[in-house]
Amino acid sequence: MSDSITQPRFGVDLGGTAIKLGRVEGEELVQRLEIDTPHEGEACLDAIATALRELAAGDPIASVGIGLPGVVDLERRCVIEAPNLEFLGGLPTADMLSERLGCPVLLENDANAAAFGEAQVGAGRGFSDFLFLTLGTGVGGGVILDGLPFHGPGGMAGEIGHITTGHDRQCGCGTIGCLEAIASARAMETLAAQELGRALSLEEMAKAARKGDKDALSVFRTSGIALGIALAQVALLLDLRIFLVGGGGAPTLDLLAPHALDQLEKRCFGRTASDFKLTQASLGNDAGIHGAARLS
């Protein structure tokens, strides 16, 4: 991985519904393209290759980085398991795409790629160690240590969404009490529907909370406490102080953060809330493209 780009690089963020691709020059994402995700291996890789050639517009493609959801095996250059993209499981994605494009292709977990993007040109620039997490349909995470993504021996590092928070809500993974089950954007909407007796979008719920609606504030308090419990476990294990939040739930961080910081202070002995930085990531949905493009 390099911390600077002197020629065009191309990044791909492969999701279950859409594939986001971009051309990066220097620190700028100069061109962006989004296509639907074909749910078949060969068709998916063909679509990516076609879109990348469109972005290249005749220029040589020196390298491509691609972020994939699920557990990525960097040695085998494939994703081992991707719940929303099961057809990719075990498929030699990097090698097959490299054959189509005639250039090196590097893989990374999508959350790690987004974290690396934030580290290079986003809100994480200037911090060598931090946790990046996304509050979206689920809760994803990527750990940056010494400026680079930390994978662990099996590629599972950073899965903060499945840290147990002590709640009794069942997670989609099959276990009880995961952070994802109480603090993802989707979980907060579900909680609101159950606790408030009415369906609200996260944006509507946040608007109501900022106007003082006690029921809406209660939902953010519950989710914020769970977030703080999970972050405290990360802080105690790795002594991380910086937490960047992206995803659809990030705009509600002002409502979650006070409760999360309170838990960090209570649970991390010797630390106060002011020792921690809990802030929004800055690259939005383009973080994965930026990070993937900078993998080489």
Image (cartoon, rainbow, N blue to C red):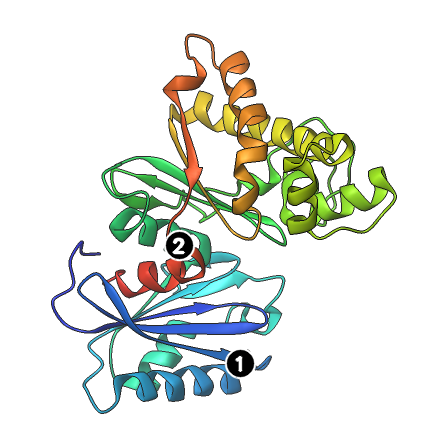
| Mark in the foreground, 1 or 2 | 2
> Is residue 92 visible to the viewer in this orientation of the structure?
no
Mark 2: few/some/many CA within 10 Å (<14, 14-19, 20+): many
Residue placed most toward the observer, 35 or 61: 35
Q: Residue at x 85, y 47 (%)?
A: 198
Residue 109 in the image: x percent, y percent? 43, 57
- As displayed, is residue 168 above or below residue 61? above
State left or right for residue 237 relative to residue 221. left
Residue behind mark 2: 114
Q: Quadrant of residue 92?
A: bottom left
- Quick one: 153 or 58, which is closer to the camera? 58
Amino acid bearing label 2:
Ala
Q: Residue extending furthest left?
A: 6
Between 93 and 52, the one lying in front of the other is 52
Residue 213 visible in image: yes
- Residue 245 in picture, x, y percent from top left: 47, 42
Local crowd size for mark 1, using a 10 Å CA cut-off: few (<14), some (14–19), many (≥20): some
Q: Residue 230: image x %, image y %?
A: 56, 30
Looking at the image, which residue is at 39% across and 62% down? 286
24 sits left or right of 75 in the view: left
Horizontal and vertical percent position of residue 104: 25, 74
How far, Cα to Cα, is label 1 from label 2? 23 Å
Rendered-image quadrant of the N terminus:
bottom left
Q: Secondary structure at mark 2?
A: helix
Q: Residue at x 56, y 53 (%)?
A: 248
**Residue at image x 53%, y 46%?**
251
Q: Nearer the viewer, residue 240 or 106?
A: 240
Task: Look at mark 1 in the image and give the residue it sits on.
Answer: 41
The answer to whether residue 68 is above or below residue 159 is below
- Disc 1, SS: helix
Examine the image and state in which quarter residue 168 appears: top right
Sequence-wise, the earlier of marks 1 and 2 is 1
